[in-house]
Image (cartoon, rainbow, N blue to C red):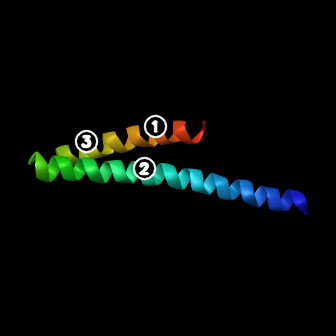
Amino acid sequence: MRDLSSSIVEESGTVQKWGFIAMHAAAAAVFMFLLQRFAMHESQETSLLWALTFAVCAAGLAYKQANR
């Protein structure tokens, strides 16, 4: 019984960690898209490319931080 509850807690922590990573990546992508598209008046393609780049970088940083 004890192993089952400990397994559930570990799975919950894993879900929270990946949720944190996804949230961090999404926030970085939205920020960069809005900055490029509306503040710098770039094309949609350029804005999406920068948003994707920053999302990947933010996810990588959040992953490193979550594994500390």
At 32% from the left edge and 44% from the top edge, which residue is drawn? 52
Q: Give the vertical position of 6 relative to 54 (above or below).
A: below
Label number found at residue 61: 1
Q: Which residue in the protein does label 3 denote?
A: 50
At 46% from the left edge and 37% from the top edge, which residue is drawn? 61
Question: Disc 1 versus disc 3: distance between alpha carbons?
Answer: 16 Å
Label number found at residue 48: none
Q: Which residue in the protein does label 2 denote?
A: 24
Circles 1, 2 touching at the beta carbon (< 8 Å): yes
Q: Circle 2 sits in a helix, a strand or a loop, which is it? A: helix
Circle 2: residue type: His
Which quadrant of the figure contains the N terminus? bottom right
Q: Circle 1 sits in a helix, a strand or a loop, which is it? A: helix
Q: Closer to the observer: label 3 or label 2? A: 2
Q: Earlier in the sequence, mark 3 or mark 2?
A: 2
Whether residue 48 sits left or right of residue 4 in the image: it is left
